[in-house]
Image (cartoon, rainbow, N blue to C red):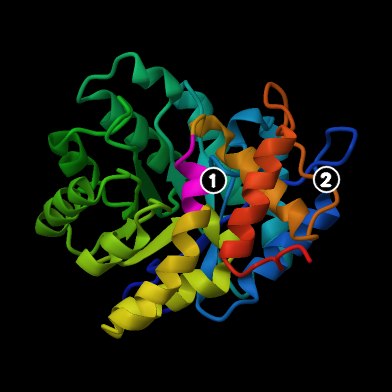
Amino acid sequence: MIPATAQPFCGIYVATLTPFRSDGGIDETLLADHFRTVTAEPGIAGVLCNGHAGEIALLSREERRRVVEIASETIGKTHLIVSGVLSEGTAEAASHAVDAAAAGADCILVFPPFSWALSQDRTMALTHHRAIGEATGLPMMLYQAGVASALAYQPEVLAELVRLPQVVGVKEGSWESNAYDRNRRLVKSIAPEVAMMASGDEHLLSCWTVGSDGSLVSLAALMPAEIVALERAVDASDLATARVLHGRIQPLANAIYGTAPGGWATPRLKACMMLLGRWPNGSPRAPYNDLPPPEIERLRQALVTAGLLDAPA
């Protein structure tokens, strides 16, 4: 549901997870409950499904479409649904975007193909995004990858992308506050109507203090109330409250995203869902494995620090 406002795509979006049954299939009942639960918090604008946290790379085309359908069936009348689009080939990515539109997505977020980490030129991203946009007509968000990744768009490429007429926002995941600030200034100088959404889960306070139009973050799957409260405190220039919330949020963010190996972020999020008693099964899909016991204990302590879990007696 796209609200009839001047800037309808601003706000906090929960980057949702994908629960699996013990046989490896998507647990559709639990996924629907997940969508309802995370959007029940006032201040959540919508969800980003089929993102990296939702294990998009491990879902089939049919599963990706079904994830959007479930989101549309459960929260489509009250919240925005953004669906990630990720495929190595442009034609295949465009077909996935068409699927998302047919399934009820309000907007798509185009991820750069993983092969671009090996090589990309300044025309590839423009060709890819333009073709996907023309195939669907849906509003589109960009994904600006971390500064340490070769997937990150160079300033001249980002400048061209935000000029595309269907681009309404940028999930800015530079994962470095100064890079975020530079990209934000660049985009706002070229396309001030495009929402710049600071979405590095470990850098929320610093980036939001600089200025942001919202965020698409997987940490909100665990603590949506605290993420919304942090944004409101920053907007109100209530630094004291923001620091208290940051003190709860940051250790958990560091435990999930800031500890090697970084590829364990989604399994860690899902393990936290189990530790909090929200999911009976937090297993990721192969090639990822269940986390070892010491890792689970480390996450348990981070959840206690965050005030989400009681300390053991």
Within 10 Å of disc 2 (Cα), the crowding (few <14, some 14-19, many 20+) is: some
Rendered-image quadrant of the N terminus: bottom right
Number of the front mark, 2 or 1 = 1
Q: Quadrant of residue 112?
A: top left
Kind of residue indicated by mark 1: Ile
Q: CA distance from mark 2 to mark 1?
A: 18 Å
Q: How many marks?
A: 2
> Which is nearer the N-term, disc 2 or disc 1?
1
Tell me if residue 29 comes above or below residue 25 in the rendering. below
Tell me which segment is drawn in magenta. Answer: 253-259
Residue 262 location in percent, x, y? 49, 33
Within 10 Å of disc 1 (Cα), the crowding (few <14, some 14-19, many 20+) is: many
Q: Secondary structure at mark 2?
A: loop
In the image, is 73 to the left or to the right of 302?
A: right
Tell me if residue 22 comes above or below residue 310 in the rendering. above
Residue at the farthest right position:
23
Kind of residue indicated by mark 2: Asn
- Which residue is the site of mark 2? 281
Tell me if residue 175 comes above or below residue 226 in the rendering. above
Q: Is residue 93 magenta?
A: no
For residue 52, say whether it is visible. yes
Q: Is residue 254 magenta?
A: yes
Residue 74 location in percent, x, y? 73, 66
Q: Quadrant of residue 294?
A: top right
Rendered-image quadrant of the C terminus: bottom right
- Main SS of the magenta part reads helix
- Which residue is the site of mark 1? 256
Between 44 and 219, the residue placed more toward the observer is: 219
Residue at the farthest top position:
118
